[in-house]
Image (cartoon, rainbow, N blue to C red):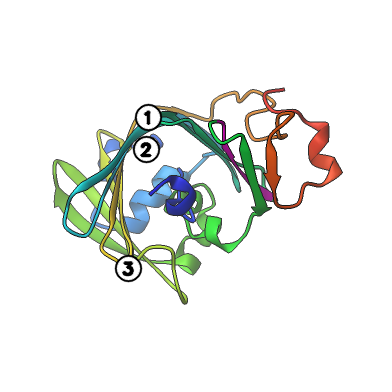
Amino acid sequence: MRLAAAFGLVLIPCFALHASAARAADPHAVLAAFSQGLEGLKGQFVQRVFDGTGRLTEDSHGTLALAVPRQFRWEYEAPFPQLIVADGSKVWIFDPDLEQVQVRPQGVEEQQSPLMVLVDPAELDRQFAVADGGQADGLAWVELTPRGDDPPFSKARLGFADGALARMDMTDSLGQRTRIAFSGWQRNPAFDVGTFRFVPPPGVDVIGEVDEAAQAFPLGD
């Protein structure tokens, strides 16, 4: 399951906090310490997806960036390149091998991403029931259960170690599990101007609506 499915998914989302907070019993205290003063994050990820029987069906890695309140960039490097960019109003999913871009309004699916609510904490309790997930695999866990109808996943768990988010595990209604390990976090980095902007490269097929305003900011500027 690509993050295009998990990030609504996913994505996001890291992020240095005081080590004592990661061991706190109150999960709200952990998340509050994490988000205090947070404006942006960037790092690397390794994503593995398992089906309902526990069989590994996907093993991929790449880089990600998040910015307050609703921007993200999730880039798969291997085994197949794919770029997902949310600019605050639209989500762009670019598949270089297919020479195809899908674009749609950025909405509720992205708000329900565990990573996005971490950089937009006002959405946390509205989107999720938050609970202490205990200690396992050397990590202190926070459990998030989506509120509302037809959520994109049934449960997410965030694992903290050494003062940072180390892992995110998600389970969907069919029992498929997505496990994402994070590393190399930079807190509040200086992002390049084009980090959260995307314009379809010449010659690619575009599925969805593209407004003229988006054309003013080519990818990577």
Residue nearest the observer in this picture, 82 or 31 = 82
Q: Which residue is mark 1?
A: 79
Identity of the residue drawn at 56% across and 31% down: 96
Task: Tell me whether the residue at label 3 lies in contact with that at label 1, contact meaning CB atoms closer than 8 angstroms.
Answer: no
Question: Is residue 23 visible to us here?
Answer: no
Residue nearest the observer in this picture, 76 or 131 = 76
Question: Is residue 5 visible to us here?
Answer: yes
Q: Which residue is mark 2?
A: 17
Q: Quadrant of residue 44?
A: top left
Identity of the residue drawn at 23% across and 56% down: 25
Question: Disc 2 marks which amino acid?
Answer: Leu
Between the C-alphas of marks 3 and 1, the distance is 26 Å
Percent across and percent down for residue 31 are 39, 51
Is 10 magenta? The answer is no
Mark 2 or mark 3, which has the lower sequence index? 2
Task: Tell me whether the residue at label 2 lies in contact with that at label 3, contact meaning CB atoms closer than 8 angstroms.
Answer: no
Between the C-alphas of marks 2 and 1, the distance is 32 Å
Q: Which residue is mark 3?
A: 173
Residue nearest the observer in this picture, 2 or 40 = 2
Q: Are there few (<14), some (14-19), or many (20+) residues within 10 Å of tag 3?
A: few
Q: Quadrant of residue 101?
A: top right
Between the C-alphas of marks 2 and 3, the distance is 31 Å
